[in-house]
Amino acid sequence: MRSCSNMGDAQARRLKIRVKGSDGETYLPHTLNNTVVAPPRMLIAFLENNLQADGSVRIPEALRPYMGGKDAIR
């Protein structure tokens, strides 16, 4: 899960970032805004795959050590 947005020169303008080109001219660079893991998207995918009919959430085996050994959230 990731997202990447071309921000044009909006972030550079706001942060006052300038770059000097090979021709000596100064300009506003275009920037990218990247998110490797977007927490809301990750949570939605987790719930879609682990929500049980009774409303509990199954904890995958790989995550149980981080959840105190629990196998579900009830």
Image (spheres, grey):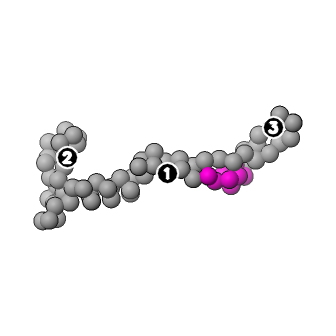
Q: Residue 7: percent from the left, percent from the top?
A: 63, 53
Please say whether residue 11 is visible from this viewpoint. Answer: yes
Q: Residue 30: percent from the left, percent from the top?
A: 69, 48
Q: Which residue matches tag 1?
A: 3
Residue type, mark 1 in image: Ser
Q: Quadrant of the C terminus?
A: bottom left
Whether pointer 2 and pointer 1 mark residues with C-beta atoms closer than 8 Å, the reply is no
- 50 relative to 21 in the view: left or right: left
Which callout, 2 or 1, points at the residue further toward the start of the chain?
Answer: 1
- Quarter-of-image position of residue 55: bottom left
Give the residue at x 45% y 49%.
2
Whether pointer 1 and pointer 3 mark residues with C-beta atoms closer than 8 Å, the reply is no
Give whichever of 53, 68 is nearer the camera: 53
**How many circles with numbers are drawn on the protein?**
3
Q: Residue 15: percent from the left, percent from the top?
A: 68, 49
Q: Which residue matches tag 3?
A: 21
Q: Which residue matches tag 2?
A: 60
The magenta-colored residue range is 6-13
Please say whether residue 64 is visible from this viewpoint. Answer: no
Residue type, mark 3 in image: Gly
